[in-house]
Amino acid sequence: MATDLILVCHGQSVQKQNGKLLGWWADVPLSPLGQRQALLLGERLQRDFDIGALYTSPLIRAGETADILGRMVRVTPVVEAGLRELDGGALASLSYEEARARYPDLIVHGRVSSDGHLPGGESYADLHVRVESVIGRIASQDTGQVAVVTHGGPVVAYLRAFMSYMWETRGKPRFICDAASIHHVRIGDGGEKTVVRLNDTAHLSGLPG
């Protein structure tokens, strides 16, 4: 039986905390808009899919999204540590401005250390290997329609791996991954791969961008 992976990006998270702008590395809850997005996403999953298993990143914004979806599709979310966003290491406790002041080369110019790692954290190569492994395991153990709630970085990493791109491959494709978006791929009985839809946010029609 084929496995349909419904890769879901969590809803919009809180953008500020104590008056400070947060970076993507912050482990924060959903915003009120993100909660509304998750509800609409849950309605979409109820209507268009038959979700038999649900996995989630351990980060708060993903877990809250998965809890809302799980209640709506009547499936208990399973936490998978390997689905978390890129480990920001030393950035984790910093606001965006604090990180920019302390690591200007990284935040302003996007340069990382000589080995490609964030300070005290992961490299994008690490992320690629981690995500390919954990979602590959999920796909091998579950059939039918499986929802995976994660983040933009892991979604992009897995889509590249699904299309047989290695981390070091030059000219890798880029993918847009909006909040509360659906990315649907299928692995057939014989291992054949199909991309069904990418960055589908039709269920969010009428909400603020």
Image (tube, rainbow, N blue to C red):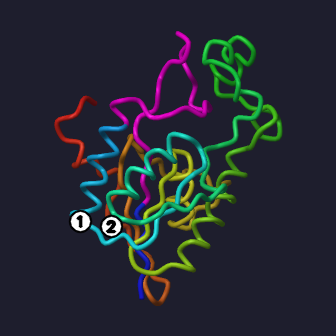
Q: Looking at the rendering, which quadrant does residue 60 occupy?
A: top right
Count how many numbered circles sit on residues in the image: 2
Q: Residue at x 39, y 73 (%)?
A: 145
* Residue underneath mark 1: 48
- Front position in the image: 149 or 197: 149
Front of the two marks 1 and 2: 1
Residue 44 lies, with reference to residue 192, above or below; the image says above
Counting from the top left corner in percent of width and height, residue 181 is at 36, 48
Q: Identify the residue at horizontal 26%, vertical 62% (top origin).
A: 46
* Quadrant in which the N terminus is drawn: bottom left
Indicate the secondary structure of the residue bearing disc 1.
helix
Indicate yes or no whether the magenta region holds residue 162: no
Relative image position of residue 64 (x, y in whole percent): 47, 44
Q: Residue 51: where, in percent of width, then height?
A: 36, 69
**For marks 1 and 2 on the same chain, the one whose residue lies earlier in the sequence:** 1
Residue 83 percent across, percent down from the top left: 60, 54
Residue span colored magenta:
7-34
> Residue 81 appears in which quarter of the rendering?
bottom right
Q: Quadrant of the C terminus?
A: top left
Name which residue lies at 44% across and 78% down.
3
Per the image, label 2 sits on a secondary structure element best described as: strand
Tell me the residue at 31%/54% (across/down): 42
Q: In screen coordinates, is 145 left or right of 163? A: left
Q: Which mark is residue 196?
A: 2
